[in-house]
Every structure is written in structure tokens, then in C-alpha cells.
Amino acid sequence: MSRPVLAQIDLQALKDNLQVVRRAAPASRVWSVVKANAYGHGLDRIWSALSATDGFALLNLEEAILLRERGWKGPILLLEGFFHADELPLLDKYRLTTSIHSNWQVKVLQNAKLHAPLDIYVKVNSGMNRLGFPPERVHSVWQQLRAMQNVGEMTLMSHFAESELPDGITAPMARIEQAAEGLNCPRSLSNSAATLWHPQAHFDWVRPGIILYGASPSGQWQDVANSGIKPVMTLRSEIIGVQTLKAGDAVGYGSRYRASGEQRIGIVAGGYADGYPRIAPNGTPVWVDGVRTGTVGAISMDMMAIDLTPCPQAGIGSPVELWGNEIKIDDVAAAAGTIGYELMCALAPRVPVVTV
Ligand SMILES: *Cc1c(COP(=O)(O)O)cnc(C)c1O
């Protein structure tokens, strides 16, 4: 490893975060959401740290098959179901639980030749208007599916658009109640935000993602600061150059920063080609040699500049944390106008990853 940028994955933090979920939803089983390569953390790298989960939820067959090949025998849920009819033999072979959100999937399931029935999650559109049946259609779809030999256990599923808000699930819950009327079925509704903040939506299976990785579903770290969750990913690097600016000197592309007086800056090996957001403005927090400081100038492809005024002892080789325990990924994301989810998922393949 020559270039000093590095992502460190803390498997103990992942295990501890699963326990936070357990304490938050003690009566529910847990689908650990590991879509998008476990939110950028590496599914193959992290799944066994979550093996105390009840099931894994993800999107694509390749990731589901990887879990089976690694020896996971528990449930696997395909959150968006199958995308084409020709996937059914693989769902059958690998015993995957599938979401059913559209009529064409009902027909495909009806006509499939399976070795054994598949467990299904019938998705109701509770107002997000992405996937799912309208509440008033759920009853008839349910009866149709219930009558099929290819269908095993059935669970009602929905997803919230703004469960980070105190009143964010009231209207969707009313639609879900309408859909569930008379069905007396298990339900799975809660993402991370509802798992933490809306216990009335927990029901049989919760589906947390982001809190397992130690970031906030609201995008604001202070909302989870007392929940016990810990950041799993640390993105670190080192200072590889130092400059001393005079008043009026500019830094980086577009001269987006100018010094107002003499100022030491450090050049860090880390840029947007590593997954750091190029749009991060001057003052985006970074941590160097034990001190919190901020970026200066535009983020380059491979480098960024940081203000060394608060840390005169820092110099070439000083350790830099771009996000992790000291600098929360939510804070970097907020500065860049996005959410921790996007930064995690965008960790670039060129960044070496180590687990601790
Ligand atoms: C991504 C996803 C989740 C997890 O969401 P978080 O906000 O990361 O907890 C749960 N359910 C579905 C359907 C999802 O797509």
C-alpha cells in the first residue's frame, strides 16, 4: 500500500450496532439491509459480522448468491423482488424470499415451476409512490397469491418516505392499516428511522440499513448521537505536502480559497476519485493529528488542502481522518449537501480497505 488513503471497517462496531437495533426493536426480527455492497462496506467483507441477524435484505441475485455460497442458510429478502421471469429458477434454487410489488410478478410467480413454495413480501404503496400495490388493491392481490401453490409464507411490506420526521408515518400507517384490514398477517415496515423513532411501526420484522453502518437516517449525527450506534467506516489518509500561503494566495482549481494572511496548509492524499465529495465547500471538517480543522479550496481528483492553523505541529506524514469516529460522515455529507448514505456507497474501488 503506497498511497496513504485507506478505508478501515470496524467489524465490532457493526456487531454492536446490530445490538442497538435489537434493543430498539426487542420484539421484532431483523432484516439487516446489505444492499449496494453493504452500503459500500463490502458485502463479502462484513456479512459474517452480522451473522447474529435474522436475515439479510438486498437487491440483486449476485449478492444473494454470494451469501448462500459463503454459507448463510438463513432468510434472504430481495427488496425489489425479481426483475425478470428468468430469475425464478435461481430464487427457487437459492431459496430467496421475494418482494412482489407488481401484477406482472404475480403472473410470473403463478406460472413458475418451483421445487418448493417461495416466501413472499407483498408490497403496499403507502404513499411514497415508488413500488407497491395501492392499498385498496392489496386484499384481492393477497387472496390471489394465497391461493397459489408456489407461495409459502406471506408478509405485508411497505416503506416510509419520511420516517425521520416525528409525524412522518401517520399518513402511511393509515394506508397500511387499510391494506392489512382482515388479513391478520405479519408485517415488515420499518427502515432505520422507524426502527429508532417509531416503535408502533416495528411489527414482525424491521429492516434497518444505515444505522448498522453507524450513520444517521436523518442525515444529522446529533439525532443518533445518544443511540449507541458507532461509525463502522473510517476514511483516513496522511498529509503529503505543506504550503505556507501569504495574504491573497489561492489554493487549488478555480482558486476557490484565498488566504487572508499567512497560513499553513496541508495537502492530503485523498480526493473525489477516492469517493470524497468534490462539492465539499471550504471549511468541511477534517481531523488531523488530533485536531479538528477544515478543507480549503476545491477538492481535486486525488488531493485536497486543509487548514493547519489550529495544528501547527502537523506536517508531512500526519494522520488525517476524512470521516469516521472523530469526523462523522453525516457532518461531511451535510457540508456537501448530501447524506452519509451517498458517501458510503460512493467509496471508490481504488481505496484499499482493511477490517479491524
Ligand atoms: C434501503 C432500504 C431499507 C433500509 O433503509 P435505511 O434507511 O438505510 O435503514 C429498508 N427497506 C427498503 C425497502 C429499502 O430499500
Image: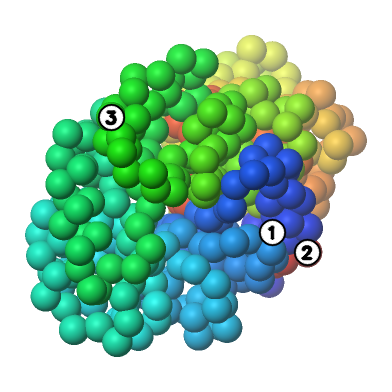
Q: Position of residue 321 (x, y in %)?
A: 72, 44
Q: Quadrant of residue 97?
A: bottom left
- Name the amino acid type tagged 3: Gln
Check mark 1 vs ligand 1: CB closer than 8 Å? yes or no. Answer: no
Q: Does 303 sit left or right of 149 as displayed?
A: right
Residue at (22, 34) in percent of width and height: 135
Residue at (28, 29) in percent of width and height: 178
Pick the front one: 215 or 82: 82
Q: Which residue is mark 3?
A: 178
Q: Separation of disc 1 and disc 2 at Cα?
A: 6 Å
Among numbered discs 2 and 3, the one appearing first in the sequence: 3
Q: Quadrant of residue 283?
A: top right
Residue at (31, 38) in percent of width and height: 182
Pick the front one: 206 or 294: 206
Among numbered discs 1 and 2, the one appearing first in the sequence: 1
Q: Which residue is mark 1?
A: 9
Q: Separation of disc 2 and disc 3 at Cα?
A: 47 Å
- Name the amino acid type tagged 1: Ile
Secondary structure found at label 3? helix
Check mark 3 vs ligand 1: CB closer than 8 Å? yes or no. Answer: no
The N terminus: image quadrant: bottom right
Could one spot residue 320 in this view of the protein? yes
- In the depicted structure, whether residue 219 falls above or below residue 207: above
Residue at (84, 40) in percent of width and height: 289
Q: Decide: few, some or many residues near mark 1? Use Cα within 10 Å; few <14, some 14-19, many ≥20.
A: many
Q: How many marks can you see?
A: 3
Q: Which residue is mark 2?
A: 356
- Name the amino acid type tagged 2: Val
- In the depicted structure, whether residue 22 falls above or below residue 222: below
Secondary structure found at label 2? loop
